[in-house]
Amino acid sequence: MKLSVVIPTLNEAANIGALLEYLLSTPGVSEIVVADGGSSDRTVKLVRSPVRLVRSEPGRGMQLRAGARRATGDVLLFLHADVLPPRDVASQIAEAVKVGYVGGNFRLRYPGGGALGRWLETLAPVYRALGRYYGDSGLFVRRDVYEACGGFPWVPIMEDIIFVRRMERMGPTAYLPGPMLSATRRWKGRPIRTLLLWACMQTAFALGASPWQLARFYKAHNPARISENKCNGVL
């Protein structure tokens, strides 16, 4: 198995250097592709060979597509810049693929996430049983399956939800032990407000709201966050 890790970035200088160093020393990671959406900080300067840099228009879905297009692995792992995978991430994926899974994700942990982090850790397996999981949990997929289901959509938000729906229709998926260690910056200092916003957006999407409508709604309620590309994949 050749595993390619694809990481979308936009102003991730605080995280990307340490993550790349970690991945370069992780057994079984064959290739790392960073898809940058126009960072204005030092993110691009921190991406050095053998890591491959792809420049893309901003938007996590577009960046993931651009990164996947340049990746050469037969299995793809899509990873957020503020998430740390387990050291044996490649062997966990290889075993899942070997026994017939088309893709899947990982159990999440939120170190320092407080009460909301613990609640999300408890809730995640319940949502996973319903086939609902998100980009911060580390999505992996066989390359042929990725291509067959059309990859990530060209939408401004909810790209991970749409992709997971497509992947789930392609065959059995695995929920691996991980854990993926996720940052808590998305709700730091405002856990209740963030939780209510997520719930509202998920409900609206389930009722038929378009990704473009939801992006405008998110921007209206989080103008600073949307400018940093944090709206993409927050759910």
Image (tube, grey):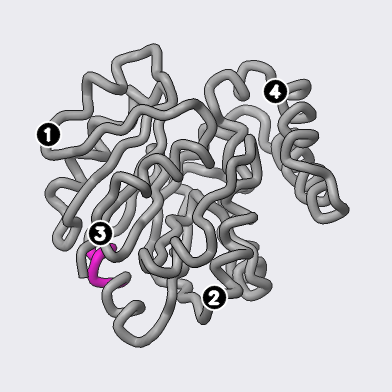
Label 4: how many Cα within 10 Å (few below 14, some 14–19, many 20+): some
Q: Which label's residue is closer to the chain start, 3 or 4?
A: 3
Q: Which residues are magenta?
A: 88-92
The amino acid on which the numbered mark 4 sits, given as a three-letter code, is Asn
Q: Residue at x 62, y 33 (%)?
A: 231
> Going by the picture, which residue comes out furthest to the bottom?
99
Circle 3: residue type: Gly
Label 2 or label 1, whichever comes before in sequence order: 1
- At 22% from the left and 19% from the top, the residue drawn is 45
Question: Where 142 falls versus 230 (above or below)?
Answer: below
Which of disc 4 and disc 2 is earlier in sequence?
A: 2
Residue 122 seen in the figure: no
Q: Position of residue 48 (x, y in %)?
A: 15, 29
**Residue at label 4?**
222
First along the sequence among labels 2 and 3:
3
Contact, CB < 8 Å: mark 2 with mark 3?
Answer: no
Distance (Cα) linking label 2 and label 3: 19 Å
Q: Identify the residue under disc 1.
A: 49
Q: Is residue 89 located in the magenta-colored stretch of the structure?
A: yes
Q: Residue most toward the top?
A: 40
Disc nearest the viewer among 2 and 4: 2
Q: Is residue 16 left or right of residue 152?
A: left
* Front position in the image: 84 or 210: 210
At a point 47% along the width and 26% down the height, the residue shown is 57
* Residue hosting label 3: 73
